[in-house]
Amino acid sequence: MKTLTYRNINNSDERVNFETALLRGMGSNYGLYMIDKQDLPKFSTEQLDSMGRMSYAQTALTVLAPFLEAEIPRNKLENILEDAYDESKIKTEMDYVKEYIHIMWLTNGPTYSFKDYAARFFGRTLNHFLGERGLKRTVLVATSGDTGGAVADALCGLDNVNNIVFYPRGSISQGQRRQMTTLGKNIYAFEVNGDFDICQALAKTLLGEKELAKQVFKDENHFTSANSISLGRLLPQTVYPFYAYSRMDADRKPIIASVPSGNFGDMMGTVLAKAMGLPIARIICGVNENDEFPRFMQTGKYNVRPTVSSPSSAMNVSHPSNLARLIDFYGGHMFDERDPKTNKVTREGVIDKMPDLDSMRRDLWSVSIKNDMHYDTMKKVFEKVKVILDPHGAVGWRALECYHQSGEHLMPSVIYETADPGKFPDDIKTAIGFRPATPTGIKKQAQLSERVYTIQSNPEKTPSGLKLNSEQVEEAKTKIRKIFS
């Protein structure tokens, strides 16, 4: 049985197995780990047909076993996946809405977000490997809304893991914040002045702080990541489209997947699924007003601008981490330029080798959905088909409509709905006139006390937007030393 290796996209000589990639979080030179296209497992039509009789956990086992069973015995992997995707805790639903449109509801997990799927897999595989080695790790994660709560819930109470989560002050809902701040135990929530990109830059910087890890934890490799930069978050996201296809009446015809996209994890997982043999005609990448990617697809030029706030708050990302993986997958190379002395990012998204744009354009289509279009879409969908979409699902729906308005043919399509509308009551009321029901878990957390660590320092203001300030890094390091001393 062949053990697959994963290449550091910033250092092709660095190849590691899944366990090492998971424990490290990120490779040297801030490189993300990526599988070579030729090493991807391939699925036959007969294998795809058989998935229609499988639960989500069984589908995940079929899709992920070729990646992992050389490192995790199949029976243990099956136990991990059955626990992660126990239908009493996380139930995946598919709705046929009208004509050619299906919605895949990835919203029924513990934190009512699609992030639960990857986080639960990540937490259980990480805890497995750490237990086997007799190690402990601290997981650093940045969140624009849903990631933090999902990762915190998935890691809470695990024997071998601590979790530090960074969230942008004033940019997430109260319900989202409380999913991180009320857990206690091994979960430490940090409020940061700035936007998601500041939080992400802080997490990435601390991942590279080998000396801090050595001082505090006696292990320079102690920090790892649960953001989209983690391979342990990416691989389980390849399962969604397989499950969706298995529940669609596509009659072996190619489908369209419309993916609301922020940090590009779902979209990248869907790209991998297509390369693994899933018949996807086109992947629609809907973004909000942070439109760097559709502009790149149109012009071939990538320019990062200041992050713009949109109702689809978890997608308020101007420089998606997984874009570097996508560029790599299509033969190019992207990196963040850093000061050699301070490791501070001086220029984001530098492309020193262009990808095959023609191939990208054949596989992907991207559009920016403006803020008012979020509300307009939620209103029209509710009026016409009585479905309440959250702002992120609205981006997926409207992006698919835009795709068809561009002259493309109709075919079976699935929209990823990524968060329970009850997590965004004010936005829903603005769109349709009333607030949706609040999920039970969020009601309970509203009554609990919070534990918050605040980074008081402000980010640096530059002509191109906010940038991580070295004072923020030092303040975070001081607080980490105090917590774990």
Image: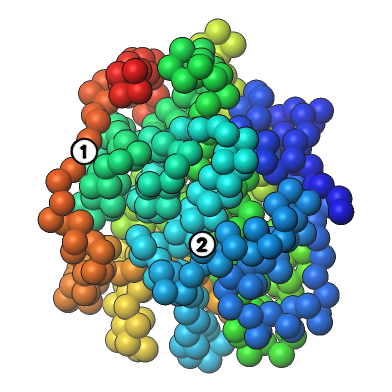
Residue at image location 50% in from the left, 33% down from the top: 137
Q: Quadrant of the N terminus?
A: bottom right
Q: Amino acid at mark 1?
A: Arg
Viewer-proximal residue, 361 or 57? 57
Q: Quadrant of the C terminus?
A: top left
User: Could you tell me residue 85's position as x and y percent?
Assistant: 51, 67
The mark found on residue 328 in the picture is none
Q: Is residue 52 left or right of residue 80?
A: right
Against 292, is 442 above or below? below
Question: Disc 1 designates what residue?
Answer: 451
Task: Give the class, few, some or many, for how many residues have Cα within 10 Å of label 2's Cα (few <14, many ≥20).
Answer: many
Q: Is residue 442 left or right of residue 73?
A: left
Against 68, is 345 above or below? above
Q: What colouring does the structure picture have?
A: rainbow
Residue at image location 55% in from the left, 77% down from the top: 414
Find numbered disc 2 in the image and state the secondary structure of the residue it sits on: helix
Comes first in the chain, label 1 or label 2: 2
Against 298, is 307 above or below? above
Q: Amino acid at mark 2?
A: Ala
Q: Is residue 458 visible?
A: no
User: Could you tell me residue 214's position as x and y percent?
Assistant: 51, 15
Give the alpha-carbon distance from disc 1 to disc 2, as whole Å: 26 Å
Viewer-proximal residue, 340 or 186? 186
Residue at image location 50% in from the left, 88% down from the top: 96
The mark found on residue 84 in the picture is 2
Viewer-proximal residue, 376 or 142? 142
Task: Give the class, few, some or many, for how many residues have Cα within 10 Å of label 1's Cα (few <14, many ≥20).
Answer: some
